[in-house]
Amino acid sequence: MEDLIKRVRNVIDQCWNSFSAKTGSELLVLNKEASMQLNFAYILKNSMDLVIYHKDESVGIELETSIEVNNHHRNCDIVVSIQKDGEQVFLPIEMKYYKEYASSGGKRGAVDIFFKDVYIDLELLESYSKLNGYLDGIQLTMTDFRRIIYPPNKNSKYWNYDISQGAKIKAGTNYTTPIGGRSVDITLNKNYIFDWKNVGRFYFVKLEGNL
């Protein structure tokens, strides 16, 4: 099973690189986050046969899977089910996409909520990994807003949820800065580093926590 899981993680990396290249060259045109999820899931689904080496192995893809965490149901963007020799495990993937301009042509705004939501995704993935059969998950984020990645300053309070190039999250940190007038209480128990990749006019980052 461990070897199959490793193969799955490798093909996810390859698919993310392919997705980034296609989006950066505008072979893929993404209008919103749902388009990001669907297009990445399509590439992933059509690549999973590459990891099947034995008759007792299978890999499936499911979108918007409901997962119960702390008595609340959360919809995970993509769950990869991995089966071998009667054993089954699940690898969750959460995704975020922030566009500088809305479809109407105006500035999208709500960048503070986006920052906070990336951190919420990471907290959810850590929660999923504590459930029976769930593996450490992956967070995938993209944006066309360069100032998020390379900000001229970090004067606003939402920079407490820093996602800029090179930003680091230290395991055990609790985040409580209110966003949008609402209280926040996020604790991340793993270490993360934001290492964005630039392709065309877009920026892409894959986040996986480590202890």
Image (cartoon, grey):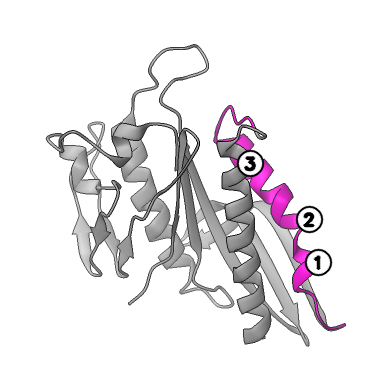
Residue at position x 45%, y 29% in the image: 99
Q: Which mark is residue 49?
A: 1
Q: Amino acid at mark 2?
A: Asn
Q: Which mark is residue 22?
A: 3
Residue 63, image x and y in percent? 67, 51
Q: Nearer the viewer, mark 2 or mark 3?
A: 3
Secondary structure mostly seen in the magenta stretch: helix
Q: Amino acid at mark 1?
A: Asp
Q: Nearer the viewer, residue 164 or 185?
A: 164
The magenta stretch is 29-55
**Residue 103 magenta-drawn?**
no
Q: Residue furthest right?
A: 55
Write down the residue under mark 2: 46
Image quadrant where one finds the N terminus? bottom right
Marks 1 and 2 sit apart, C-alpha to C-alpha, by: 7 Å
Q: Give yes or no for contact between labels 2 and 3 (Cβ–Cβ under 8 Å).
A: no
Residue at position x 42%, y 53% in the image: 121
Q: Amino acid at mark 3?
A: Lys
Residue at position x 20%, y 42% in the image: 159
Residue 105, image x and y in percent? 47, 12
Q: Secondary structure at mark 1?
A: helix
Q: Secondary structure at mark 2?
A: loop
